Each structure stands twice: as C-alpha cells, then as structure tokens.
Image (cartoon, helix red, strand yellow):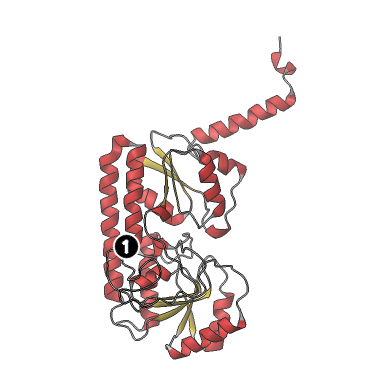
C-alpha cells in the first residue's frame, strides 16, 4: 500500500521544511555541535573576533552580520532566529542591534554573554573630550557622571545614551575577552584550560596594541579629530584625544543641522584639523562635503564593525594598527 498518498500535502510540506531546518542545524550553519565543536553565534564582527581568538579549534563560529552589512541595520530572518536558539553559546553586544537583543532574550540559550555587561559603558554624544584623561583602574579618567578626578565635567554633548562602541578601546575589549573565555569554559568544561590560555594570549595581544597607541599618540601637534559618527569616544578618552562627530552614536541618525556643521568648521580651524575621517560601511558623502568646505583631506578611520575587501587589514588588530597610523598622520604625531 502506498501510505504516502494519504498524507495531506500541507503536512508533507511542513515536514520537508522541518527536515531542512534540522539538517541545517546539524550541518553547523546555526546550531548544534558540528564535528564535536562548540557552536557559537556572534552578533557582528568584533564579537566574532573574540569568539574565534578564544575558541580557536574548539569552536565553530557563525556571524549573524554578513561582511559589508552595517550592523545597526541588521534584521534577522525567521530561519536565523530559529537557528540562534540551537547555539551552544552566543556572544553579542546589547545596544548595537535591537533585533539581536530581542532574539537572544527569546532564544533560551543557556550560555550567552553580553559584552556590554563586562565593562563600564558611558554616555557619549557628538563630542567626546578626552583632554582630562588620567590613567586609572577603569582607564576613562571620569566617573559615571562624566567628571574627572578634579571634578571637571567632560564634554559629551548631545548624549545619545550608552555608547556601545567599547571594542575600539583595546583595554575594554580585553575586559570583555575575559568574560567570553569564562562563558566558553562553562559551556565546554573539557577544554577549559585551552580557553583560559587563549584568553590570556588575546589579552596580551590587546595590551600590546594599547601600548602602541599610547606610544604612537604621545607627541602630536593636534588632539582633535573629526569622524562621520561618534564611534571613537572610548578611544578618545583612553588616549587623551577629542572626537568631534558629524552624527551621533547612530551612523545614520538623520540630517545634520546647519549649526552643527558651522560648529565643526570653527572647531576644525581652531584646532588645526587637516583631515575628516569617513568609514568603510557607510556613505562618505557628508564627510567629503565638510572636508571640501574646510579645504582639508579625507581619510578612513574604521570603526571595525565588519571586515571587507576594503578594510585596511585582515583582522581587528591589523585594522586598529591602520587606524593608529591614520590618526598619527592626521594629528601630526611623531
């Protein structure tokens, strides 16, 4: 007897879709262990970098954000949302991608790590003044109210809320790395020692990167730089610089007011700014317009939200080193 012909077509179709999803999960594209590896989902590139550096051969990492995609704009498909729930571990940064934040909350995955919970966030706006930077345990030189050790208030104009761009400060990223290492160890105790060793190696690499920035930006003619959006606030605070951004925390937060453009023009002249920085994943139009008005150059300062063929390096460390070189050139650092 041909039993199959008595099964409703809709049931068969549903079974086919379920089978495809199950097969996909087993293949390691989004969930389940593949080849005995810890299946990790990362929300976007900086989290992918951490996962791969700490997990090495013991993990298989899936990045929810495809190369070349602006992470803030990410929308998850039903398939991606379903596969997220099959992950052994999730590494994300709350506040960058609302769709991911919601999906993680609903995923039911036990081993999740929010990078934003592993270091102290600050409220930044279109201007972040790191002049009063002092080296302390938290490395910002300011308390949670934006005051430095002398009680002076930092210049975080037009605050957009907590700034999630912590990965652009190597010291903060090292703090996050330690939390990711512990999460992997909890999810995969058999390789706990390897995760600890890999975490230590990454922290050293980030400490060395921090030293390069400290040394490379010591002697400079100017300390002010202009960017497309306010992604570099933590970097500015860490190394005693001032970031002036055309847009706020969101790279596409809307039209820029004429008063802001006039303010930037005055700041550029007062602080001898010779470069306006743009990014690889967003339109350079506004930066080029401002640079033309000022009669200065443009260059790339990469927020490293994704790696593409246009990136000045193959990974986070290489692109950060390229960012350092760009800042040295623009600020007249020796």
Quadrant in which residue 235 is drawn? bottom left
Closer to us: 162 or 175: 162
Residue at x 37% of width, y 54% of height: 118
Q: Residue furthest front?
A: 151
Residue at x 49% of width, y 75% of height: 157
What is the tally of numbered marks visible in this picture?
Answer: 1
Mark 1, Cα crowd under 10 Å, few <14 / some 14-19 / many 20+, is: many
Residue at x 37% of width, y 76% of height: 130
Q: Horizontal and vertical percent for residue 196?
A: 27, 46
Q: Say whether residue 100 is left or right of residue 315.
A: right
Q: Say whether residue 233 is left or right of residue 138.
A: right
Q: Say whether residue 256 is left or right of residue 86.
A: right
| Quadrant (top left/top right/bottom left/bottom right) for the N terminus | top right
What residue is shown with label 1? 171
Closer to us: 240 or 153: 153
Residue 119 vertical position relative to residue 33 in the rendered view, above or below = below
* Residue 90 seen anywhere in this rendered image of the structure: yes
| Quadrant (top left/top right/bottom left/bottom right) for the C terminus | bottom left
Find numbered disc 1 in the image and state the secondary structure of the residue it sits on. helix
Quadrant in which residue 259 is drawn? bottom right
Q: Horizontal and vertical percent for residue 144?
A: 39, 66
Residue 333 vertical position relative to residue 138 in the rendered view, above or below = below
Q: Horizontal and vertical percent for residue 237?
A: 37, 72
Q: Horizontal and vertical percent for residue 221?
A: 34, 86
Q: Residue furthest top?
A: 1
* Residue 69 seen anywhere in this rendered image of the structure: no
């Amino acid at each position: 007897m041909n039993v199959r012909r008595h099964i409703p077509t809709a049931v068969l179709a549903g079974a086919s879709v379920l089978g495809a999803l199950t097969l996909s999960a087993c293949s390691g594209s989004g969930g389940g262990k593949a080849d005995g590896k810890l299946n990790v989902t990362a929300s976007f590139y900086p989290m992918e970098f951490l996962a791969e550096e700490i997990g090495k051969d013991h993990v298989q990492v899936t990045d929810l954000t495809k190369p070349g995609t602006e992470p803030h704009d990410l929308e998850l498909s039903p398939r991606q949302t379903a596969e997220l729930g099959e992950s052994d571990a999730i590494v994300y940064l709350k506040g960058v991608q609302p769709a991911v934040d919601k999906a993680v909350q609903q995923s039911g995955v036990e081993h999740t790590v929010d990078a934003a919970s592993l270091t102290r966030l600050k409220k930044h706006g279109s201007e972040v003044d790191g002049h009063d930077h002092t080296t302390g345990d938290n490395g910002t030189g300011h308390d949670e109210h934006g005051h430095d050790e002398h009680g002076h208030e930092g210049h975080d104009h037009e605050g957009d809320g907590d700034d999630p761009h912590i990965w652009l400060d190597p010291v903060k990223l090292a703090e996050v790395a330690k939390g990711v290492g512990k999460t992997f160890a909890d999810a995969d105790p058999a390789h706990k020692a390897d995760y600890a060793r890999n975490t230590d190696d990454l922290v050293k690499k980030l400490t060395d990167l921090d030293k390069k920035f400290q040394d490379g930006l010591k002697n400079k003619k100017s300390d002010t730089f202009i960017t497309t959006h306010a992604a570099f606030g933590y970097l500015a605070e860490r190394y005693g610089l001032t970031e002036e951004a055309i847009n706020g925390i969101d790279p596409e937060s809307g039209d820029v007011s004429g008063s802001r453009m006039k303010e930037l023009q005055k700041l550029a002249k007062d602080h001898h700014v010779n470069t306006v920085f743009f990014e690889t994943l967003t339109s350079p139009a506004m930066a080029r317009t401002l640079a033309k008005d000022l009669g200065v150059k443009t260059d790339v300062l990469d927020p490293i939200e994704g790696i593409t063929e246009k990136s000045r390096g193959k990974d986070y460390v290489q692109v950060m080193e390229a960012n350092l070189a760009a800042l040295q050139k623009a600020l007249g650092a020796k």
